[in-house]
Every structure is written in C-alpha cells, then in structure tokens.
Amino acid sequence: MSTPGRSSPPDGDAALRAVTGLAARLSGTVVVGIALFVLWQAWPALQAVGPLRFVTDAGWHPLAQPAQFNLLPMLVASVAVTLGAMLLAGPLGLFTAIFMTDYAPPALARLLRGVVELLAGVPSVVYGLWGLVTLVPLLAAWQPPGASLLAGILVLALMILPTMVLASHAAIAGVAAEHRLTVAALGFSCAGSLWGVLLPAARAGLCGALLLSTTRALGETMAMLMVTGNVARMPDSLFAPARTLTANIALELAYAMDRHRAALFVGGLLLTALVLALVRLARGLGCAWRHA
C-alpha cells in the first residue's frame, strides 16, 4: 500500500522517461529539419549546376559569365585548419586536463580551471582581433603575407583549447571513485593507473571532447574571416592565404541571389556532411578503443 501524499516511484520514473523521450525526439527532429532545410535551399544549384562542377570548375566565380562554382579549395582549407588546430589543441588540452585532475595541487587546479573557463567565454571575434593585430604581422615579418592557413590554424587552436580542456577534465574527473581505489589497492603507479585504467574508462567522454572541439573548429567563422586572407584558391602551403567554407558563406550570403545563393547552401551541405562523417568516425574510434 502506498503512503498517502507520496507519489509512487514507478509513476515518477514513467513521467521522467516520457519527458526525456519527448526531448530526445524533439532534438532529433530539429537536427533533421535543419539538414533538410539546407538540402532544400541547395537543391536548385545541385540540379542546375550538377554536383561534379562544385569540385571540377576552374574556380569560385559565381557572378562571372559563365559562372564557376568550385568549392573544393574552400573545403580543403576548412579541413586543413580544423585538422591543424586539433593536432595542436588536442594533445595539449588532454595533457592539461590530466595535470588538473591528477597532478596539480587543488589550489592550482582551481586556478587553472578558472582561467580556462574564462578563455572559453571569450567571443571568437576577440580571438580574431588578436590574431589580426598581433599574430598576422608576426607571420608577415617571417613569411608574407601573414594572413594565411597557418594563422587560421594557430588562432583556431587557441580558441578550441579551452573546450578540449574542460570537456576532457570532466570526462577524467567523472571516472568512478571505485576505479581509482581499486588501482591504488593493486599498487599501480600514477602513470600506470592513468594510462591503463582511468583514460580507457573515460574513453566515451574523451571521444566526445574531441568531437565537440573538432566541430567547433569546423564551424568557426569570424576569426577565420579575419586571419586567413579570404582568397578562394587552393592553398599550396601553410603560408598561403585561404578561405574556409564558413567564411565564404558569411562573406557572400548577404548579397547572393538565385543560383549563387543556392551554391552557398551547397557549402553548408558539405559542412553538414563533414560533421556527420566526424560523428561516425568518433563512434568508430570509440568502438575500436573499447575492443582494444
């Protein structure tokens, strides 16, 4: 017999299950709706121009006669700055999180976390301004013109580093206390327990940290507008100017019309496809790590 005035736990569980299930379905519907909207807006260009021309045309000249719609240089630039930034920020962020969790004194760990949280809240345009007035002139003195793929990689690495640190720290700190007590009782060294037990136990959260940081890097716009040079051609070196897909959309969407506008949505469709590929890759890496 249930106590008067007290709800039955199964009823509460059922209500919570219904609410969370509704929220999950709503979130999935929104994501699918966005993807379908982008495809709908890009369809006129895909139908009139054809998919192959977006990677085989001589360049990106949507207002020329005849118009050219090559998005490949901007796709390559987007992937290059994202990959370069992750190669810098990924290991640095992971090791910083490890230091904060397992090696730093509590007072220093709290200080570092506060600084990282502050950096995570800085608007992207501020990072772009710093890159434009400080980093780009330094690179120009070394290897002109300064505004380049390398400038984009360095600014982007600095931008996503706080995200990588905080997400990795949360994943490592969230490992159950029982794991730490068990490895301590077995006499594992700090390094042995970290690499052999704790990091594998936190693999799902670490994969999520990598995915979150990578997708943020891939979608960054303002800072890339300011430091990469905005030249829509294939970058042939780290010091060459480039333009990312996000920067291209932001620059031209305000005045684009008809087929030009639809071609910009094709760029958005490519970004969506890249994010889906990253999610699939993250799941594959998680499975590989789990079975290793």
Image (spheres, rainbow, N blue to C red):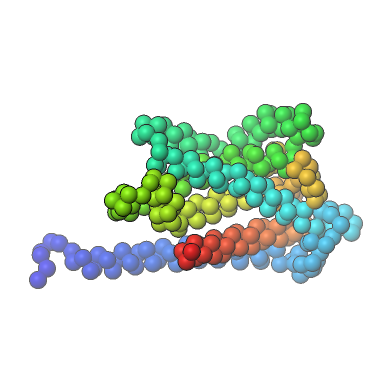
Q: Is residue 261 visible?
A: no
Report the side of 29 relative to 240 (left or right). left
For the point 38% across and 46% down, the residue is 189
How far across and down, in percent of the image, does residue 55 sit? 79, 61
Horizontal side, residue 278 vs residue 170: left or right: right
**Observer-nearest residue: 139 or 58?**
139
Task: For the N terminus, give its image quadrant.
Answer: bottom left
Could you tell me residue 221's position as x and y percent? 65, 45
Quarter holding residue 134: top right
Most extreme residue toward the right, as rendered?
A: 65
Which residue is rendered at x = 77% and y = 28% of the image?
141
Where residue 288 sits in the image (x, y, percent)?
51, 64
Choose between 141 and 98: the one closer to the eye.
98
Residue 271 visible in the snapshot: yes
Q: Residue at x 66, y 61 (%)?
A: 269
Please give the name of the residue rendered at 53% of the width and 62% of the height, measured from the top-left corner.
Answer: 285
Number of residue marks: 0
166 is higher (above) or lower (below) than 178? above
Left or right: 67 with respect to 4?
Answer: right
Q: Nearer the viewer, residue 245 or 63?
A: 245
Is residue 223 left or right of 209 when viewed as pictured? Answer: right
Coordinates of residue 271 in the picture (x, y in percent)? 65, 57
Viewer-nearest residue: 199 or 185: 185
